[in-house]
Image: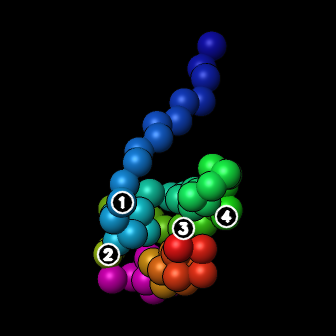
Amino acid sequence: MLTRRAVNFVTHSLADAAFLFYGTAVMSNRPRQVVKIINVDKERPGDPISSKVQKARTELWTLFKNFG
C-alpha cells in the first residue's frame, strides 16, 4: 500500500520559501496560527527568477510587512 508523505522545512528566508517549495505556510506571531498558505505552481527544476517564484516572493514580503 502506498501512502503520501510530506516533509516540513522551517526557513527564515523568504527567497528560499518561494523558490524551494511548492507551498509555504505563513504563521502569525501570537497566537501561533497559519495566516495564509501560498502555493507556487512551478516546474522542477525550478527557476529562481521565474514570474511565479517572484510573485510568491512578493506576496510573502507583503504578508510580513502587514503582519510583521
Rendered location of residue 11, percent (x, y): 37, 54
Q: Secondary structure at mark 2?
A: loop
Asked whether 57 or 27 is in front, the reply is 27
Would you call the spot at circle 2 few (<14 residues within 10 Å), some (14-19), or many (20 or more)?
some
Q: CA distance from mark 2 to mark 3?
A: 12 Å
Residue 37 in the image: above or below residue 63: above
How many angstroms separate mark 4 from mark 2 (CA)? 22 Å
- Of label 3 and label 1, which has the lower sequence position? 1
For the residue marked with disc 2, what is the amino acid? Pro
Q: Are marks 1 and 4 in contact (CB under 8 Å)?
A: no
Residue hosting label 3:
40
Q: Is residue 43 visible?
A: yes
Residue ID for mark 4: 36
Please state which of the two labelled residues, at mark 3 or mark 4, is closer to the viewer: 4
The magenta region covers: 49-55
Instruction: Looking at the image, tell me whether mark 1 or mark 4 is earlier in sequence order.
Output: 1
Position of residue 31 relative to residue 19, above or below, is above
**Label 4: which secondary element:** strand
- The kind of secondary structure the magenta stretch mainly shows is helix
The residue indicated by pointer 2 is: 48
Q: CA distance from mark 3 to mark 1?
A: 18 Å
Q: Which residue is mark 1?
A: 12
Q: Residues within 10 Å of mark 4 (few under 14, many from 20)?
A: few
